[in-house]
Amino acid sequence: MNFSLILFLLVLFTGFFYALDALVFKPKRRLAAEQALEGSATNPNLSDEAVRRIRHQHMKQPLWLEYSASFFPVILFVFLLRSFVVEPFKIPSGSMIPTLLIGDLILVNKFTYGIRLPIIDKKIIPLSDPQPGDVMVFRYPQDPSLDYIKRVVGVGGDVVEYRNKKLSINGKPLPVTELDKYYDPNNFSYSLQFQEELGGKKHLVINDEEAPPFVIGAQSFRYRDNCKYDVNGFRCEVPQGHYFMMGDNRDNSSDSRIWGFVSDEQVVGKAFLVWMNFNDFSRIGLFH
């Protein structure tokens, strides 16, 4: 059961008691308080403090009702925030190194690509489409209960080629600039590092010199016939309404080369901000 569904059930549960209190219990308590005050009205020595005490005694909610009803606005706010505005996400693997590191806590914009109904993820208001170069969170096609994050490389109609570790879109090689090698302190290793330009946006990618250029472990997936694999790499034509995703850590990423295309129905949102990394506070900030 995913967190959004748990939040939704909590909203229903607490909302039921919130409504029950507002429509049933609160009017009963108010009536009881008024009756108690009317019965005490014949006492001329009844002070204002005593009146307040009588009213408070009768208007006080039972503890179970007080907590369940009072939590409703908070849970509803969190649910709406996560469903329609931003959702937190933790980077679980190194597939997006050097852009995103393991342990980065990021925020995902949920409305950039359109407003979707929570739980069923049905788009009801289209706003924009994912563009090449975007860092996007999506439901893993092989198991929609899992969220993945990769970079959009190709959109519907694009021909994506990756041969000898060089990426081309529609027959045009992407501009790349070789940089100093990237050092990974977790693995105590160096990788070739490049600045790549995709969709008018520049980002960093790394390659493992020891890894072969061909794809290992390609699975069976929908529109598998759109892809051709050989010893130098692959060529894929992206179906309409789908996206081809790749990690910036090109030789250590399980992505569309392995498990296929991401459909528009599986899009979660656009990642845009590292809001915390408890191992390195300097990681906090916008990325692209």
Image (cartoon, helix red, strand yellow):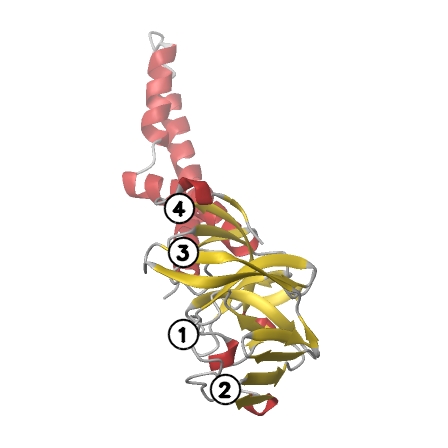
* Residue at which label 1 appears: 210
The residue sitting at 58% across, 74% down in the picture is 166
Label 2 element class: loop
- Mark closer to the chain start, 4 or 2: 2
Image x and y of residue 11, in percent: 43, 53
Asked if labels 1 and 4 touch by Cβ distance under 8 angstroms, the answer is no
Tell me the kind of residue under disc 3. Answer: Tyr
Which residue is the extreme one toward the bottom?
A: 225
Image x and y of residue 128, in percent: 69, 62
Image x and y of residue 79, in percent: 47, 52
> Mark 3 to mark 4: distance in Å?
19 Å
Which of the 4 quarters of the picture holds residue 281? top left
* Residue at which label 2 appears: 221
Which of the 4 quarters of the picture holds residue 18? top left
Label 3 element class: strand
- Mark closer to the chain start, 4 or 1: 1
Tell me the kind of residue under disc 1. Answer: Glu
Tell me the kind of residue under disc 4. Answer: Asn
Task: Categorize mark 3 by other alpha carbons within 10 Å: few (<14), some (14-19), many (20+).
Answer: some
Looking at the rendered image, the disc whose residue lies closer to the viewer, 1 or 2, is: 1
Which label belongs to residue 183? Answer: 3
Label 1 element class: loop
The residue sitting at 36% across, 8% down in the picture is 44
Looking at the rendered image, the disc whose residue lies closer to the viewer, 4 or 1, is: 1
